[in-house]
Amino acid sequence: MTDSERPHGRADSGAGASTPDIPPPASEALRTALGQAAARAAGLNAEGAESTGAAVWTAMGGWRGILESVLPSLAFVVLFTLTYDDRAGQGNLWLSLGVSVGIAVVFSVIRLAQRSPASAALGGLVATAAAAGLALLTGRGQDNFVFGFITNGAYGTAFLVSALIGWPLIGLAVGFLMNEGTRWRGEPRKRRVFFWLSVAWAALFFARLAVQLPLYFAGDVTALGTLKIIMGLPLFAPLVAVTWLAVRTLYPPRQT
């Protein structure tokens, strides 16, 4: 192995010498954690995918992932709309939210039965239940979407700020997945691509807020829920495809 092939920050200490395990510095651990989170958010953790379509399908979780993402919200919107009372200015919250959470429970039980990691099985259920609890507490159907606003705001801010300070989250994610660390920062082309990809992801999250927040303040639960679904996977999938294609261009498969 030549010096250029060794990971940065390591040096040989002599033949046969053992190198003690040294914990990574806090900054490196933080970058790795951010890279992992960004990879999940941008759907880049599609290991083994050989095509863009396969990568997008994996990022969405296949048919089960699509159903888990869409059905709870769809059930809430449909039932809330069907039970809407003009005099009360409200749909049946208990029924709408109960069915929505019930669907999330079914999916979680299926995942647990198939021995999926507990975090994957329960993460969506906890988020759905917490949102439903807030809506029941306030008595307002639109509050079922508050946690989604917080998530979009947090992700959008993180992607945008990371790009502006020169540490785009897409770069951290790709560096983590490609075992490259942060060496991509020494290549202007990669830095430009990762910058604009991170900005694009920030734009997606902020676009959701820009469109949906006015409906939230107007109390239009049906339109809000419908647009939440439309601006979910239908916008997520194309951006995953663009991101995946850009990464494949920067890291073409090695010819054997």
Image (spheres, rainbow, N blue to C red):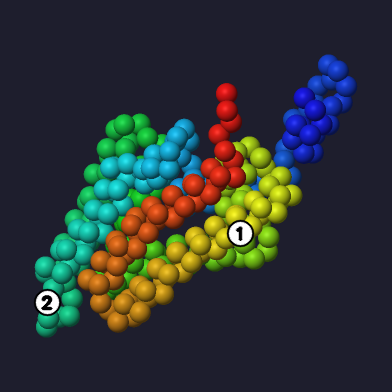
Q: Residue at x 39, y 39 (%)?
A: 54
Can you name the residue that lies furthest to the right here?
14
Q: The residue under label 1 is which amino acid type?
A: Phe
Say if 106 sits above or below 189 in the image.
Answer: above
Which residue is rendered at x = 40% and y = 68% of the image? Answer: 208
The residue beneath circle 1 is 195
Residue denoted by label 2: 85
Left or right position of 62 against 24: left
> What is the quadrant of residue 175 in the picture?
top right
Residues under labels 1 and 2: Cα distance?
A: 48 Å
Specify which label sits upstream in the sequence, 1 or 2.
2
Q: Residues within 10 Å of mark 2 (few under 14, many from 20)?
A: few
Give the camera-side residue of 163 and 67. Answer: 163
Position in image of residue 151 (x %, y %): 45, 62
- Residue 107 figure quarter: top left
Q: Looking at the image, which residue is at 41% across and 75% down? A: 210
Q: Secondary structure at mark 1?
A: helix
Q: Quadrant of the C terminus?
A: top right
Rendering quarter of residue 199: bottom right
Which is closer to the viewer, label 1 or label 2?
1
The amino acid on which the numbered mark 2 sits, given as a three-letter code, is: Asp
Which x, y percent locates residue 113?
29, 33
